[in-house]
Image (tube, grey):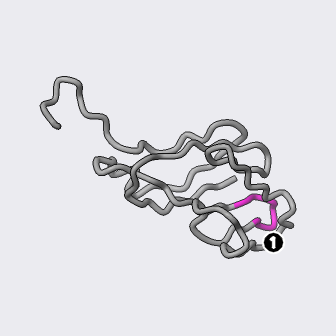
Amino acid sequence: MILMFSPVLMDAPYEARVDGDVLIIDGVALDFGPLPAGAILPRAAIDSPWIAGDVARDAGGVLTVPLILPHGARAPHATRFPAPIEAGDGPVDLPLFETPVPEDSHED
């Protein structure tokens, strides 16, 4: 599964995992298994606030899923301008929500 991201400034991140053709975001499963090779599932047909566009399965069977990517005010450049990632079964290693502030920082 290829995940493409549309970064959006938000209050909190989500957790995602992949199980075959199922993408699970914060415990809600989105099953793309029925989508045949070469087909496109329109965004309007998907009941999830995290899907950013149409989901497609190429002729080789690979799914491409565009996702909203929440990020904080101090998100690193790689999060604000993320590259697509290939996600296999298991937890998805999402870009950092924001750059951690060092403990000795005086930032409030």
Q: Is residue 90 left or right of residue 15?
A: right
Q: Nearer the viewer, residue 12 or 51?
A: 12
Q: Residue at 63% across / 37% down in the picture?
A: 91
Residue type, mark 1 in image = Gly
Quadrant the C terminus occupies: top left
Q: How many marks?
A: 1
x, y (%) of residue 69?
49, 55
Residue 82's image quarter? bottom left
Q: Position of residue 12 (x, y in %)?
A: 44, 47
Relative to residue 72, is residue 103 depicted above or below?
Answer: above
From the image, give the main secondary structure of the stretch colored magenta: loop
Residue with the mark numbered 1 = 38
Residue found 55% across the figure and 40% down from its top: 93
Magenta stretch encompasses residue 13: no
Label 1 element class: loop
The residue at 31%/40% (across/down) is 99
Residue 53, x across and y down, in percent: 60, 71
Q: Residue at x 52, y 60 (%)?
A: 68
Res. 47 image quadrant: bottom right
**Whether residue 68 is situated above or below residue 86 in the rendered picture:** below
In the rendered structure, the answer to whether residue 107 lies left or right of residue 49 reads left
Q: Quick one: label 1, few (<14), some, or many (20+) residues within 10 Å?
A: few
Q: Is residue 82 above or below residue 101?
A: below
The front one of 57 and 90 is 90
Please identify the residue farthest to the top as the structure is shown.
104
| Residues in magenta, as a range | 57-63
Q: Is residue 15 left or right of residue 41?
A: left
